[in-house]
Amino acid sequence: MKETKTMRDRDNDRPYGIVRFILTVIAVFFAVCLFNALRSTAVNFGDLKEQGVELISETLGSFVKSLALFVIGFAVVYLILKAVQKKTGAKRTRIAVCLVFFALAIAAVFVFQYVPVADQILVSDCASQLNAGNDTSLLLSDYGYLIAHQNQIGLVNLLRVFYALFGDHNYLSFQIFNAVLACIGICWCGTKMTLHAAKDEGVLPVYESLILTCLPLIIYVPYLYNDLISTSLVMIAFCLFAVDEGDSKGMAKSWKRVVLSDLIIGFAVVLRSNALIPAIAMILVILFQRNGNRKNKVLQIVLLIGIVYGMNVLSRLPYHAYLSGIPSIPSLAYIAMGMQGRGGGFNGFNAELYWSSGADAAVMHEKCVTAIESSIAAWKADPETFRTFVDFKFQSQWNAPVYECLEMVLYTAGGENAIVTSLQNGVLRRLVQSFMKGFQVFYYAALVSGTWQLRKKDGILSVLAYTIFGGFLFSMLWEAKARYILPYLIYGLPLAAIGLKSFFRFLSIRITGNDQRS
């Protein structure tokens, strides 16, 4: 009887076949990313105003230099953190890493002195005007920004709070919030998830080193948009969701954690619609859990959907009278835009569509269908153009080492100093580009290993892998921008840390014959 119970428990720890299949597909996807990273590099044009991307074939010399630069930098950070953890303990080291990250992020804010442009300044101005009682941004007669881009209402609401509390157009308050939330979500909650999955404190210095060497993450803090805030919120929600595994019936140990996790995901979706991808990943994990009964799964899924939908409705209530019956730019327009140009990056397509259609939903839909059919017809006439289009779109998003984050901040950097100048067109620019090339090669290799290990057990940390792959499917349809991949880069850090730690353990066994777990 005891033996039978042990065998049953072992079976309950194994994932369903569909989970193993999905994770195998995702591991193959990361292998393709690694292959692309080995053969070429997607880099931004030297002229920052272009905001364009080119693919450059790797030479053996440049490739070896990139790998050596990253390995040396990562090794220094890793050995320091490993020694600190051994001396002071894991918890104090985690706190220290959070403080170091915060210091670097705030330093970036003052070094770059970022000046918002384009959508960022429009969103900021909308918040400022609405706080002052000016509803111009919501009037169709004036083609107000929010009436066309209703997906930005959540960010406008958040900025309205900051401006009311800290002063009109107080960008610094938003940037500090960005840094604090990243410390909580990406640094602290990320280490917690990584430790929970690996069951080995030796993995923590690996994850912490990846955070501190992931330069786009630190550089992007000054950017006045919703990407990083939404990503940090998702990491917090994932931590609440994944670390609390549940009892034998598949119920969460604490419904407070479930509700809080759903509320945080809902907030992330309100700020950025792309956060629906992590929410869908959570639903898939609940569905694919072996040790849960159907009733409990349905309750958890209904609760998640209800909270996300309800928070989205609440965020729009103050503007209901303005938005009633008036469409925003439809989702189909972004898909049509993603099929235009060399790599789906024609940023002005959807805005031009809206203005030229007079905000008429039927007209917009017809024009979107026409644009999509035109692209498909051109690809059918010349299949090679479709292959090159997909290849460029894939690589220019997932194989750009700096993920455009450096470019976007430098484009309007107000800081007149040697660091900014060198990052724009000098030595630091080349070093950062090369360092991140080495980072992404090791990152994708580690993701293959980390994802493959998830296949061995029914762990709900697979929510990270589902989210990244969902982001890939989304990005190949939607507008092509390399910086939009940054959230998925961050979601993969725990998996990459687990993969790298396994590699370190393999080396330890080969070299010393001992399986060292610290």
Image: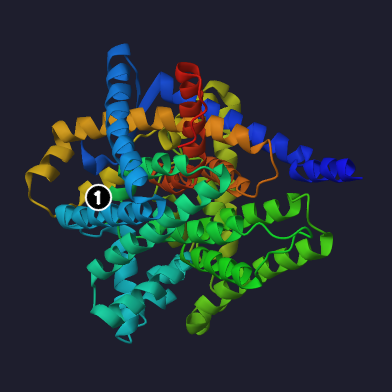
Horizontally, is 229 left or right of 513 in the view? left
Q: What residue is shown at x 65% (from left), y 32% (from top)?
A: 25
In the image, 68 versus 201, the foreground residue is: 201
Vertical placement of 415 versus 439: above or below?
below
Horizontally, is 29 left or right of 272 in the view? right
Vertical placement of 73 versus 457: above or below?
above
Vertical placement of 365 versus 210: above or below?
below
Quadrant location of the C terminus in the rendered image: top left
- Residue tagged 1: 409
Q: What residue is shown at x 61% (from left), y 75% (from top)?
A: 310
Quarter of the rendering containing residue 7: top right
Q: How many numbered discs, if any?
A: 1
Quadrant location of the N terminus in the rendered image: top right
In the image, 151 versus 344, the foreground residue is: 151
Q: What residue is shown at x 32% (from left), y 33% (from top)?
A: 74
Residue 43 shows in this picture: no
- Outermost residue to the bottom: 133
